[in-house]
Amino acid sequence: MKRNRGHRILAGIGAGAHLPSALLAADRVEVTGGTIEGTRLADSNVRLFRGVPFAAAPVGERRWRAPQPVEPWDGIRKTDAWGTRCMQGDMFGGPIQTRDASMGEDCLYLNIWTPVTTTDRPLPVLVVFHGGGFAAGSASEPRTDGEWLAQQGIVVVEPNYRLGLFGFLAHPELTAETEGRGSGNYGMLDQVAALQWVQDNIAAFGGDPDNVTVNGESAGSMAVSALMASPLSRHMVHKAIGQSGAFFSAPLEPRIMKPLAAMEQDGVNFARSVGADSLTDLRKMPAKQLLNEVMQQNGGWGYGPGVDGYFVSRPVEDIYKAGEQASIPLLAGWTSAELGMAIALNPEKPLSLIHI
């Protein structure tokens, strides 16, 4: 990792507001898996590539496995439609507003916004991980749209990642399959795979793979803190923005990352509750049935990142205390509409909310 670039916190963001008219990414770009064709947005200097696969569909025997390499395609793949959102229920009193047309397990897609014009050097890259409590959300949400940011002269990438039961179920049989790599952090491994995709492909969109800022809000912010700590990903991030959350203990709460044994027991209990005698039985169950079951049992909550011994070997908080996280610039705070200040100061009430 080249630290000289990584220590320029957000130095490139906004630097391209006055861009020369040199052509950046063509409509067609070669990426891992094949050729994709993007769309230039109307009345904008931004080209958008929607629904680009960064891993194989995690279906069938790939359910509850680490993301596998993307399957190649022939010809030109159009990217004029948003990808599929990952399996999720109505977690916040209703569905989160997204622009994808469907939901399913085949959801490992990302979107790229890139300026049509550029300077004579690679552009900074911003990778955005959506929020939603690790149980809902999508890379197509209007609230995290990357067009305006790309107009400032950066390349924006937003990936999906598996959620809830599908992204974070642990089980002794799943752990046995991995030969010592634990289980239960598939959603986080999806994020690692997306960052690796950026390293391998972002130069084709005018981006600098040595100048990657990760950004997230709520669960996305917690993910940022974990990605900075994991040995699988910390070398691929050079700056970070955390909005409303991190994997640290709250003043009146226990640690929020369960150990592997506890996560596995949750998985055993769930399998027993749905009459599944084995992992094979669980993998044969339709995704909608599994989603309905977990929604009925606990409203879809209860499954999130844990200490699996592979993505992280101990709680993220302990990694930071030991100074073993990525040594990079971090901008952290709370968004004005988040509940975090009330939680952090509980039982005291905040006098005002912090805007960042």
Image (cartoon, grey):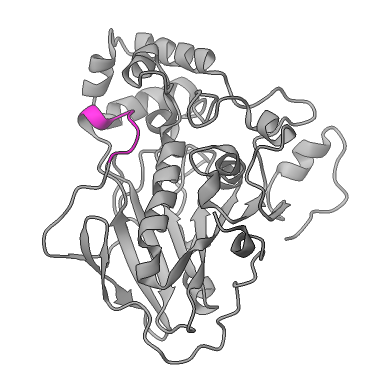
18 left or right of 167 in image: right
Question: Is 63 a magenta residue?
Answer: yes
The relative height of residue 196 versus residue 185 in the rendered view (above or below) is: below
Where is residue 333? Give x, y as percent.
73, 52
Q: Nearer the viewer, residue 61 or 313?
A: 313
Residue at coordinates 68% horizontally, 48% vertically from top-left? 338
Position of residue 254 in the picture relative to residue 116 (left or right): right
* Image quarter hosting the N terminus: bottom right
Bounds of the magenta segment: 61-68
In depth, the one of 228 and 162 nearer the eye is: 228
Q: Main secondary structure of the magenta part?
A: loop
Query: Seen from this angle, which residue lies furthest left?
Result: 74
Q: Residue at x 69, y 32 (%)?
A: 317
Can residue 290 be seen here? yes
Identified at 29% across, 49% down, the residue is 102
Image point (53%, 41%), residue name: 92
| Residue 180 sits above or below residue 66 on the image | above
On the picture, is 152 further left or further right than 108? right
